[in-house]
Image (cartoon, helix red, strand yellow):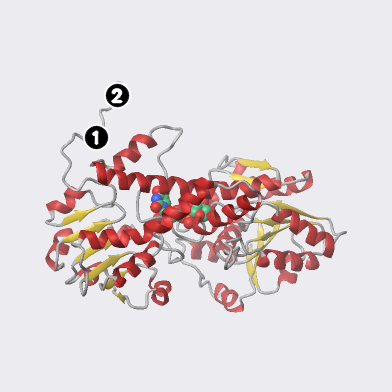
């Protein structure tokens, strides 16, 4: 299949590279000449493990190329994917679809033969219908059809998620388009790597928002349970394990922490709320989730202040991890931003280290002192706070930390350290959703014991 991918952001670039790795011939198009120039030199615009080698090998094999010329890129394509941004519109929270519609217009004008236009960007219900109207206006006789194919990949695990997804969702309204999509995803269905679910286009558009909103609800639910655990002396990790063993609930996305961030959950929950409100069917659970999560980020700053005794004026606080999650350099809606704000508002001096996020973090956190490693950040600090669970923070030398910290306090907002381990190293530890004192109850499970 000949595929054109419009937009070389996270979704576009990863999808384009993976489709070419399946054996399809892919042209990635972006208006940003600097980005395309750098891609020609195999410099990736984003940090994503394994992406540079995947791009390089497929470019070398002649299956993947980059251009700024949309007309040239799409003219022979069997399928043109739209993977441009759909940011929250300033002011009202609706998804801003101007990039999607502009791309649709250009594609419709440039196509020279029948093709399928596939929306991969996350777009509200009904966007496919609007794209169809644009095509009917600009190129009514070219045999162009419109399909929805939302992407569920996670940053940091994007290639694996694309190649081994839980499912592929395709929204189609006609059999010929379904056939093209079947052909594109044949490598996945042949290997039985993933089921391909064919649904109507509007249903497909809603599946994407419903999935992200559900995951945001799940995280927020366990975060509130974590707060309750702290009050009643229970352990949220054990609660999560205990409920997650019920197959109807499932064990994933039950890690309590400082709240979700990133490029998708905050934006998509807002957009779903807007669509729901416009259709007089408010999604109150999602509304509550957004409010609770927003409040939580700053509350985590207050949690640190409380752990330090309430007064942090002129105290030095070391933060480990700033990105919204590990294995990315993405700072969008990262909890660290609100946490730093709360700490600085209370008069603290923040020193921080992040393995990949410094460049994006600097303009957002102008008063933070950036360090080159966890021990440099911790030197003389009155508290060490883990905000993002990068792997390199999982094996810190806690005894060394104890000797270099001014106050031996670890605030572990991602629960990566069993409290006893920290206490054994001489550190006082505050976790999320854990009893303040060491547990005395029995832990673990009895293999094979009757329920
Ligand atoms: C998410 C969806 O997972 C993906 O399917 C969709 O395509 C895009 O949005 P992403 O934003 O890359 O992906 O990251 P994800 O791994 O889902 O994490 C999102 C946020 O939730 C992070 O801030 C993470 O720290 C937080 N999170 C996740 C938790 O706090 N607890 C959890 O148990 C899981």
Which type of secondary structure does the marked residue at label 1 adopt?
Answer: loop
Q: Which residue is mark 1?
A: 444
Closest to the camera, between mark 2 and mark 1, is: 1
From this view, report whether residue 249 is shown above or below residue 276.
above
Foreground residue among 335 and 4: 335
Label 2 within 8 A of ligand 1 by Cβ: no
In space, the residues marked 2 and 1 are separated at their CA atoms by 13 Å
Relative vertical location of residue 189 with respect to residue 347 in this rendering, above or below: above
Q: Are marks 2 and 1 in contact (CB under 8 Å)?
A: no
Label 2 crowd (10 A; few <14 / some 14-19 / many >=20): few
Q: Position of residue 267 (x, y in %)?
A: 53, 59
Percent of width and height locating residue 146: 74, 54
Q: Which quadrant would the N terminus be assigned to in this image?
A: bottom right
Horizontal side of residue 62 vs 264, given as left or right: right
Q: Residue at x 85, y 59 (%)?
A: 142
Residue 128 place in picture, x, y as percent: 72, 54
What numbered label is drawn on residue 448? 2
Q: For mark 1, does the 10 Å Cα neighbourhood hold few (<14), some (14 to 19), or many (20 or more) residues?
A: few
């Amino acid at each position: 299949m000949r595929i054109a991918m419009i937009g070389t952001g996270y979704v576009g670039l990863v999808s384009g590279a993976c489709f070419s790795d399946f054996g399809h011939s892919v042209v990635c198009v972006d208006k940003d000449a600097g980005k395309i120039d750098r891609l020609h030199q195999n410099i990736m615009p984003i940090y994503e493990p394994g992406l540079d080698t995947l791009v390089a090998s497929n470019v070398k094999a002649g299956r993947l190329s980059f251009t700024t010329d949309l007309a040239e890129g799409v003219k022979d394509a069997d399928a043109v994917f739209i993977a441009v941004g759909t940011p929250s519109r300033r002011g009202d929270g609706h998804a801003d679809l101007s990039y999607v519609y502009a791309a649709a217009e250009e594609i419709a004008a440039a196509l020279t033969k029948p093709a399928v236009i596939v929306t991969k960007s996350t777009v509200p219900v009904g966007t496919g219908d609007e794209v169809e109207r644009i095509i009917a206006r600009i190129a009514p006789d070219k045999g162009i059809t419109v399909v929805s194919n939302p992407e569920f990949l996670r940053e940091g695990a994007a290639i694996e998620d694309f190649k081994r997804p839980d499912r592929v969702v395709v929204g189609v309204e006609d059999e010929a388009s379904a056939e093209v999509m079947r052909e594109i995803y044949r490598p996945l269905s042949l290997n039985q790597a993933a089921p391909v679910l064919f649904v109507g286009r509007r249903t497909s558009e809603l599946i994407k928002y419903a999935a992200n909103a559900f995951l945001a609800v799940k995280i927020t639910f366990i975060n509130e349970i974590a707060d309750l655990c702290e009050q009643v002396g229970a352990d949220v990790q054990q609660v999560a394990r205990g409920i997650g063993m019920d197959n109807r609930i499932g064990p994933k996305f039950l890690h309590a922490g400082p709240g979700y961030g990133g490029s998708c959950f905050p934006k998509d929950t807002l957009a779903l709320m807007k669509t729901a409100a416009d259709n007089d069917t408010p999604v109150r659970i999602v509304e509550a989730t957004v409010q609770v999560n927003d409040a939580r980020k700053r509350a985590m700053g207050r949690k640190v202040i409380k752990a330090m005794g309430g007064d942090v004026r002129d105290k030095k606080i070391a933060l480990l991890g700033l990105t919204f999650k590990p294995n990315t350099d993405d700072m969008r809606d990262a909890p660290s931003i609100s946490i730093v704000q709360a700490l600085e508002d209370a008069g603290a001096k923040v020193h921080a280290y992040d393995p990949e996020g410094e460049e994006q973090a600097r303009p957002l956190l102008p008063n933070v002192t950036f360090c080159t490693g966890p021990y440099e950040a911790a030197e003389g600090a009155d508290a060490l706070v883990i905000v993002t669970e990068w792997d390199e923070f999982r094996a810190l030398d806690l005894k060394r930390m104890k000797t270099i910290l001014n106050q031996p306090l670890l605030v572990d907002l991602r629960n990566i350290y069993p409290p006893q381990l920290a206490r054994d190293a001489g550190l006082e530890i505050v976790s999320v959703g854990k009893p303040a004192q060491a547990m005395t109850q029995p832990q673990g499970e009895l293999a094979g014991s009757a329920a």
